[in-house]
Image: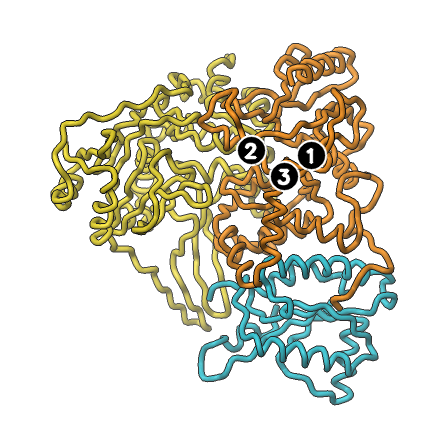
Amino acid sequence: MKEITQKMRDTARELLSSGQVALVLGWEKGYPWYKSAPTFIDKVEDVERLVFDEFCHNNLSKYLLDLAAVDGKVALFVKGCDSRGVNRLIQDNQVKREQLYIIGIPCPGLKDPDDAAGKNWGDEINGAVKCQDCRFPNPVVYDLLLGEKVPAVERGRETRELIERLEKMKPDERYEFWAGQFNRCIRCYACRNICPACNCRECVFDRAVPEWLGKANNLVENQFMQLTRAIHVAGRCIECGECERACPVNIPLMALNRKIINDIEELFGEEPAGLDPEKKTPLGRFELDDPEKFM
Amino acid sequence: MSVGLNAEKQGTGQKAWEPKILVFACNWCTYAGADLAGLSRLQYPPNIRILRVPCSGRVNPQFVIRAFQKGLDGVLVAGCHPGDCHYSTGNYFTRRRYLLTKRLLEYMGIDPQRFQVRWISGSEGPKFQQVVTQLVEEIKAMGPNRKMRDPE
Amino acid sequence: MLAIEKKRLNELLRRMNRDFQVYVPYLENGTGKFAPYQEERELYLEMNTLLPPKDIFFPQTEKMYKFRAAGNELEIEEIAEQKEKQVVFGIRSCDAFSIDCLDKVFLSRGYEDAFYKNKRENTLLVGLACTAVGDTCFCQSMGLNPQEAVGVDLQVLDLGAEWGFKARTAAGQELLAKYGDVLHETGASPLPAEEFKLKVEVEGVPEKLSRMFDHPVWEEVSRKCLGCALCTYLCPTCHCFDVSGKVKGEEGYRFRCWDSCMFSEYTRMAGGHNPRPTKKERVRNRFMHKLSYFVERYGQLLCTGCGRCLAKCPVNMDITAVIRKIKEAEVE
């Protein structure tokens, strides 16, 4: 990781001093020690702030939506999942590939900051659930790759096992399970705001007229919000797991998103989102011989 | 939705419970099919409310969730058969979208009978009658929907 | 000092719960929160709860009144006042001080919020002294004592094997007398709080901020903010709300629910104009409110150093780092 950090700084320094890019999106050390935060570097003297470690969770592609104010090219560091977020945004015409300089980092799998709370540097920390069965640890799009590509390894199956367990339940039991989850939702919208697939200019939840989503916090409104969100990112979710990490009350949102991804792959044989920026999304296209056994 | 959702309060009063079912009918096929069923004097239970939409592709999954929220016991989305869409391809998108949505709703715990999708053309009056009759029977057997529903 | 053996605490709570609605901290799906006492559930007393106790007084969604309007007839039905006496057991110094802040907002300066008042007046607060200090705790820097909460009726102290009780008000004294039979006298002394890992110097910040409205620091500070409401909803002192209604036929009700200055629609006017158009203005407002406006109006900070926002912000927005930046900033 130290090596990658050094390479990041060198690369950023070169890009900024040569004037190739106007801004570098990266991570810096936050507080406590198990947090790394997004950072924006536009001065050569600030490149020493850049780090890469097992807590660099944030998918920086989300910030590409703020680029309108930036004059010039932008460089950003991406892990495997993050790079799919970049493709997603290009696919949605939110950003132009020519405006970006993408620096890929093969990802070793990150650690769970919640598990690190109260522990010390060097202690054993659990891996992040979102990284357990990552299929694309290596960036799928980049101009420069720092470090050697790594193999995809399955480190756990927590989310998949939860989905399998839910699929075996009776409808009423499943309903109870999700009602219990959505009852806890505090409607802070961290899941939406951190998501690189959520890029509508105005979100339906923010519109007062018509009021699709009531402001009251209750099970029904929360269900409406979470289901709408899940359907909205269907076929566009890049599995970065940031929604689930950002959720302060531990709602297993990836058990929702991953289920939809499974279904899309099973029903339509579509490839995962964010691999090919040219291709239309699974729900934005169709085949004449799509299955319709339910009709 | 001014389809008389509030006209009779469910579960109150002397009247026995009757299911309320919302049918999203595409203007070009299913709505014509329903019309034909009427013209042909084909009887079907009066538990459905038809909401005419330009195309089954117009039906946002949010509409379905909202319908359950507002107290409907079942929802049917119906449109032209693949290949017959007035707008050429609208229903192909519908097919993908609702294959997925149906699975998602079931994953959320909604009973599969409560949300259905069918192709019913303008000439299929009898099919409309049969689909609606069966849907009403199934939902009558299940009783009122309490899931994803606004508290009274 | 009166005390109870730790393993017998449930006896006291059970007794208390007969006379009051008792709220205690529980861990639910990994999230600490205050909830009505249930005998068989295990209490969560190791660390502070993630969700603050403010919703006991100021629920996230609260009905205000019901109405029925038919023709020219209008009937309004008030929501019944809560008369039930309640106890919040295990409130930490940071959260007790947050209740003090909310009291200032809802009960002082000539307007009393009836919904808040009626719950607040019927509630006794039992403070719980902190011995363990979380990675993100910094209440000490905000001038609070982690072992001595402001405004509580009773302070609970950790004596090792026992919980010690010190009455702070007459009502607290009454509580101790009422349950005296399950308590005993002890000579044990309280365990001290751990050393704080996070410290920040806040001296002079409110005054300085009043001259920093147009400072470039806000551009820098707000850049990574995602504009979600996580910080405001986990904050024990944030108290903004919106009033909304629900109508069904001739009947309906009005309710209020938490709102957040981090949302873009928070300041959006009916015509579409938004005086806080970007996250820069919104983030500035949040910190200004916490560290300057509230001090100007009520003479105290609106940050209690509970550290929840820092612990959970998905982009690690760190209020202590912001305070340090403000201190370093050059102002004309």
Q: Mark 1 or mark 3: name the one nearer the start of the chain.
A: 1
Reading the image, the residue beneath label 2 is C314
Q: Mark 3 and 2 residues: CB-CB less than 8 Å, in contact?
A: no
Q: Is residue C323 left or right of residue A231?
A: left
Badge 2 amino acid: Pro
**Alpha-carbon distance for marks 3 and 2?**
12 Å
Colour chain A appears in = orange
Of all chains, the one bearing label 3 is A
Task: Return the residue nearer the eye: A147 or C220.
Answer: A147
Chain ID, cyan in image: B
Reading the image, the residue beneath label 1 is A153
Please state which of the two labelled residues, at mark 3 or mark 2, is closer to the viewer: 3
Give above or below for C174 relative to C196.
below
Picture coordinates of residue C115 (x, y %)? 33, 50
SS for tag 2? loop
Q: Residue at x 22, y 42 (%)?
A: C8
**Alpha-carbon distance for marks 1 and 3?**
17 Å
Query: Is residue C49 shown to the viewer in this render?
Result: yes
Please state which of the two labelled residues, at mark 1 or mark 3, is closer to the viewer: 1
Q: Residue at x 63, y 12 (%)?
A: A48
Picture coordinates of residue A178 (x, y %)? 54, 54
Chain ID, yellow in image: C
Residues at marks 3 and 2, common chain? no
Residues at marks 1 and 3, common chain? yes
Badge 3 amino acid: Gly
Say the numbered circle drawn on residue A241: 3
Give above or below for C42 relative to C251.
above
Please state which of the two labelled residues, at mark 2 or mark 1, is closer to the viewer: 1
SS for tag 3? loop
Badge 1 amino acid: Val
Q: Residues within 10 Å of mark 1 (few under 14, many from 20)?
A: some
Query: Is residue C294 shown to the viewer in this render?
Result: no
